[in-house]
Image (cartoon, rainbow, N blue to C red):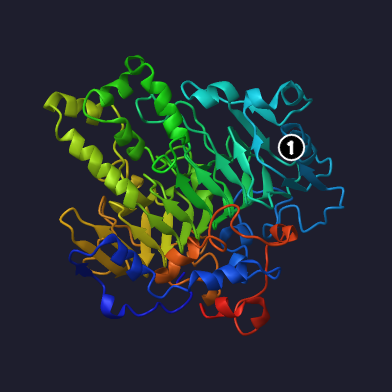
Amino acid sequence: MKMRNRRPLGTIGALVLVVAMSMTAAAAEIGANAQPLADATASSQSTDPSPIYNLTGFAAQPSYPGVPTHTFSPAATDGGGAIPETDPGYAQVSTPLEFAQALYSANKDKGVKVIEIMNDLDLGWNEVGTSVQLMASTPFASAIAPKLHPVLLTSGVSVVVINPKYGGLTIFSANGAAIRHCIWSVKATSNIIIRNLKFDELWEWDEESKGDYDKNNWDFIDLGVGGGTVDHVWIDHCTFTHAYDGIADNKGGVSNVTYSWNKYTGDDGATNPNSFVRQQIVALEANPTAYPMYNFLRTRGFSVEDIVQILQGTKKTMAIGELSLDPVNVNASVTFHHQWYIDPWDRLPRLAGGQAHNYNIYVDCTGVLAARRLRDSIAATMSPADQITLNDTYNFKPPINGSISTEDGALFVEKSVYIDCNYPLRNNQTDPSNPIYTGKIKAEDTIYIYHNEDGTTTTVRGDSTDPGNPLGPFQAPIKPFSWNTPDGSAPYALPEAAYDDPADLESIVTDPSAGAGAGVIVWDKSNWLKTDYGSFGPENPSSVSPAQWMRY
């Protein structure tokens, strides 16, 4: 899978320990060769977008022989196609009812191929009303009812079923519109594109499963849940905030999926006094003794601000494979690239069987590492009995895992950055003594920065197989990496210019007008219906602005 020569490690070497490096210095080091933001900003306004946004990875590939698909599955994902607004298959929606009607048409093969979401939509079960609830063949259903969050108790939560009968659907927003209070369930279909949307407000405090977040089963997006295969899905330039369960779960052996240029923000309670987490904490504070876990924390040294800080990051991010050792898991194939993760607790992704490719992902766990150390410092002041209760009864301890491969999955990481992950790479989460639960995982040309408690900073750029490299995995005996393709070969090749130098990733994915997330790029809306913006390199120099050309 190494499609271009790695940049020489130079003075960084395979392993360097930098003493007393500040956070500012560490950030400067990683972005030392990054392109100035002004250059990338200029390019983002172009109506001739850069090929850096092309569809790549598994979603751009045909299915492997033997992997379950549909008769209408494409050779490469193209959604509903690049059709004009005047086409009868193009629907613009501004209300929950219009959205439901457009989905009904798409699901029942009535003609809708593109759904443009014009503004924010509140899609909770109580918010959509009877016109949607009682619609014939409504794509909406009531999800597991909220238990504690004051906003969700009023709004309810919906499940929105997306299953076009013959596949081929694009759902997008030109302005980064928000989707709130609902789960999008993609099932028994193929060729789906979701772009430039913000998924928000789907979290609440978990008393019932004592912090495991195992009861409500709310994910922003589910692929392949409830039977029927799903293949060829592209989720691009979306923003995901705090979710109760996973951000997006890939179940039932879903195949040929690509996640690109997405931003995972968690909650903004550190800066927003009315954040979604803070609204929940205010409600719990009104009667803390009614909530045993919350009350335990509040009476054992955790302040409101401590709890809000620890809850900033999302607990579960991405899972691939729903049930442990399920034979269908081997069919999974998912690509993640140019992902910006902010303070995730876990699963970037967690792979059980199948195969996944991470390249150019940027993981910043600075805040969650500080939260974990805060949690541990408070725990150290407790009595031994209370420490046992905190550790064994309640789940309030960010593990800070990075990318995880289990059950003989094959997870390959390239040219990525992990900052302050306790375990950037893992290969077993169940039973390290049993190889059936161990996966294959390897990183190449990847940067790892870790700020130690003694004030020193460990900085590494290299391969996980380099002697002494702290990337891992260290949980179980390592299985040598090999792809789970039919012939063991790399599943696809990318042009050299598709990869960014990991030292540049911070400035690239965080660029406010050209980076990851919804509402970032401003261009003609027709561009959201395309999957190809031209070729890289000298064969098509006009497709890359002068500022972008300097990156390659």
Q: Is residue 171 left or right of residue 413?
A: right
Residue 432 is situated, as x and y percent measured from the top left of the image, at 27, 45
Residue 13: quadrant of the picture:
bottom left
Q: Is residue 369 visible?
A: yes
Q: Position of residue 300 (x, y in %)?
A: 21, 26
- Is residue 461 or residue 333 the one in the foreground? 461
Which residue has dot 1 on it?
99
Residue 434's place in the image compared with 410, above or below, is: above
> Could one spot residue 438 in this view of the protein?
no
Task: Give the percent coordinates (x, y) of residue 99.
Answer: 74, 37
Above/below status of 153 relative to 510: above
Q: Is 158 placed left or right of 398 in the picture? A: right
The 10 Å Cα crowd at callout 1, few under 14, some 14 to 19, many 20 or more, is many
Task: In this rendered view, identify the residue nearer to me: 488 or 33.
Answer: 33
Identify which residue is drawn at 18% across, 39% down: 377
Percent position of residue 277, x then y? 43, 33
What residue lies at 65% left-to-right and 66% top-to-bottom? 45
Point out the residue furthest to the bottom here: 538
- Kindly identify the residue that appears in the image at 58 percent across and 55 percent down: 237
Count of all numbered marks drawn on residues in the image: 1
Kind of residue at badge 1:
Phe
The image quarter containing residue 78 is: bottom right
Front residue of this view, candidates 539 and 523 = 523
235 relative position to 115: left or right: left
Give the quarter of the image for residue 270: top left
